[in-house]
Structure formats: C-alpha cells, structure tokens
Image (cartoon, rainbow, N blue to C red):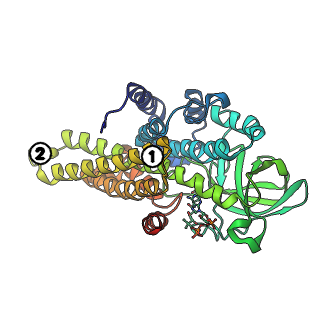
Amino acid sequence: MDFSLSEEHLMIRDAARDFARTELLPGVIERDNQQKFPAEQVKKMGELGFLGMMVDPKYGGGGMDTVSYVLVMEELSKIDASCSVIVSVNNSLVCYGLEKFGTEEQKQKYLTKLATGEKLGAFCLSEPEAGSDATSQRTTAIDKGDHYVLNGTKNWITNGGSADFYLVIAQTDKEKKHKGINAFIVEKGWEGFEVGPKEDKLGIRGSDTHSLIFNDVKVPKENRIGEDGFGFKFAMKTLSGGRIGIASQALGIASGAYDLAREYSKVRKAFGTEICNHQAIAFKLADMHTSIEAARHLVMKAAWDKDQGNNYDMSGAMAKLYASQVAMDVTVEAVQVHGGNGYVKEYHVERLMRDAKITQIYEGTSEIQKIVISRGLLQD
Ligand code: CAA
C-alpha cells in the first residue's frame, strides 16, 4: 500500500495552496463581514482550471482525478470555505451531473462553458419542505409536448444569485413518487424565473445562497437530463460525489484551523513560556492532528474509490460524516487555544468555526449520511 502523493498531485496541491494564500486570504474577513460574493476570485479560479477539474479536456475541463480535486478543495477551504463551496458545487454537482448524464448537445452547450469557468452553475434540489426528504418535491414540471412548464420554489441554493445555469429537480408525475421526478437545465433570465432574497447566514457568508422562484417557466424538452423519471436517481448519484467534495471542504476547514492554532501556540506566552509548552495545549494539538489525519484517510479513500470506478456511496458518506464532525471539533478547539483572540475576527479561527457547521448540514445532514451508511451495511 502506497500512501504517498504523485508529483502531479503535489504540484496541483501546491498551486492551490499558493493561490489560496495570495488570492483568497487578502479580503477574506471583509467578504465574510459584508457577505460579498468573491466574483474576482471565482474568475481567477476558472482561469486556473479549478471549476471543471475532472471534466474531460474535450469539454474544456482539466481531465484530472478526484484525488487532485480533493487536494485542491482542502487547500482552498483552509483559507476560504465560501470560495471552496462554489468550486465544489460547480465541479462535483453541476459539471459531473452534466458530463455523466447529459446529452452531447447539452455538454456542448452548457458543460463547455461551466468547465472553463466562463459560466457558473447551481444545483437546485432543496425546497422549503424537501430538504432531507428529497422525494417530497413540490416544484412541478408539467409535460406540454415539446416543453415542460416549471412552477415552484427552491431554497438554500448555493450560487443562487450568481449562477448562469441551474440544474433543477422537479416532480413531473406525483403518482409515480420518486420515479416521477426529473432534472432540467434552466438558464438565468428565462421568463418567469426569479432569484429570491439572499440568505443572511452564520457561515460561508461570502457564498451566495438564495431561494429561487419558478413561475410558469418554459423549459425545452431537450433540457431534461436523462430518461423520463430519472431525476431522483440523477440527484442521488450526483450527491454521492458531491459529498466527497464537502468532506474535503470540512477537512480543509479543520486543517486550516489547526495550522493557525499550532502557530499561535508557538508564539503566545503564558506563565513564562510559549503556550505549546503546556501539556493542556500540546495535548489539544495532538488530538486535533490525529483526528484530521483520520479524516484525511477517509476523504482520500472515497476519492480513490471514485477514481477506481468502485461504488463510493458509503465511503463518501463516511468521509463527510466524519470530516464534518472533525471540522466542528477542531475549530472549537482552535478558538480555545487562541483564548480571547480566538473570539475576534482578525485571527480567522472564529470564521472557520462558523463555516464548519454547514458541512454537517448541506449535501445531506450527518443524519442522512448515517442513513446512507447503515443502508449500505445492511443491504445484503
Ligand atoms: N445512487 C443511485 N440510486 C440511488 C441512490 C444512489 N446513491 N440512492 C438512492 N437511490 C435510488 C434507490 O435505489 C431507489 O430506486 P428504486 O426505487 O429503483 O429502487 C430510489 O433512489 C429511492 O431511494 P430510497 O428509497 O433510498 O429513497 P429515500 O426517500 O429513502 O431517500 C435519502 C434516501 C438518502 C434519505 C435521500 O433522500 C437523500 O439523500 N436525502 C438528502 C438530500 C440532500 O442531500 N439534500 C442536499 C441538497 S443539495 C445541496 O445541499 C447542494 C448545495 O447547495 C451545497
């Protein structure tokens, strides 16, 4: 068994690390305070190829593996989880969903622009009453022959205001339950499609989260993804990979907070010595580092499963479940190591602590991950 990273993996990790330090760190506190979408940074990430990392180069992507993707996600998330969620949604939900299940025409028209970062995507599943219970879609798409008519509201949509193309899940036949659900590509600006108010969030405040309202929106039939009734499976299959992205985001938040705590403990003095010389602090660092390493192994295993063509439903869910708990625990401890300074914005750890919480909620709460894992364990 070889745990080492290849030259290519190290290069892409280092490129993301440099980018995060030079381009994301300046202004991250201000963007968080002002809930400012990082438009300039997203443009640069597109130019670097971070928005379509795993897409085939023939559609404008980087043709990289999932291990490269999680390495980049970790580095971006150490500094700015608002930026990394944009990267995660565009790569593992939108680009993946289109590349894997879209038609050639859909790929040429939409994927080529999303993979290069020319356009941004959003994934629209959640509704006021269909968050965890994703089969209970209230948004309807009625078949009118050559088009569908879309009506309803989506909630908590990442990139909601900034996206250009939206993958929208809707109920076409209520009687058929989850087999009556479809997924559609909807463009911003279509008549009847309105972006609702921006959410005022606890964390990832730089990212752009909105409700979306569809009022008799005409969607051409060629914009349906897959066969009629494929929408729920489309969402589930896509979210399985998305969870690896969020697991790596959680890992990055945890390791970013740990790095800050470790550095701080080496310069801050109390009782006549640097606080890292007190076992109370050194043991915290030992626990933080150990749990981060365990999370990293789960994240890498899930990414490797995906790259090998293995089923990654369970390994992705385990990685997300564990890494998001580690992100919460480690960021709380990082604030504690910083003492009073940890509670003020300029030291960054309070932001990471707020950002950590969402990793236990989006792309399936921790409880949802336990459903996926336990079903996987008990299926045969
Ligand atoms: N791959 C393929 N098919 C799958 C699947 C998967 N991973 N998971 C389920 N399915 C299939 C099942 O096989 C079944 O198909 P058949 O009827 O043909 O056998 C069908 O889907 C229904 O499956 P279940 O009976 O298991 O469905 P369920 O209602 O019990 O729900 C669930 C399962 C895991 C709880 C699911 O509802 C779920 O994942 N919920 C959470 C949704 C979620 O993650 N929301 C997050 C929103 S997106 C977001 O946060 C993005 C963002 O902005 C950052």
Of 315 and 283, nearer the camera is: 315
Q: Given the current orientation, which residue lies at the most extreme left position?
A: 272
**Going by the image, does 242 lie left or right of 149?**
left
Answer above or below: position of 41 versus 251. above
Of 307 and 271, nearer the camera is: 307
Answer above or below: position of 35 versus 267. below
Residue 57 appears in the rendering: yes
> Where does label 1 land, which residue?
305
How far across and how far down the image is residue 345, in percent? 39, 48
**Going by the image, does 34 lie left or right of 10?**
right
Quadrant of residue 255 within the rendered picture = top left
Q: Quadrant of ligand 1?
A: bottom right
Comes first in the chain, label 2 or label 1: 2
Quadrant of residue 263 within the rendered picture = top left
How far across and how far down the image is residue 86, in percent? 57, 44
| Crowdedness near tag 2: few (<14), some (14–19) or many (≥20) residues, C-alpha within 10 Å | some
How far across and how far down the image is residue 173, in percent? 78, 69
Q: How far apart are marks 2 and 1 (CA)?
A: 41 Å
Residue 199 appears in the rendering: no
Q: Which amino acid does label 2 sit on?
A: Asn
Res. 66 mark: none
Q: Given the current orientation, which residue lies at the most extreme right position?
A: 145
> Where does label 2 land, which residue?
277
Residue at image coords 66%, 37%: 114
Answer above or below: position of 176 versus 270. below
In the image, the residue with mark 2 has its CB under 8 Å from the nearest atom of ligand 1: no
Q: What residue type is labelled 1?
A: Asp
Q: Quadrant of the N terminus?
A: top left
SS at mark 2 in the image: helix
Quadrant of residue 332 within the rendered picture = bottom left
SS at mark 1 in the image: helix
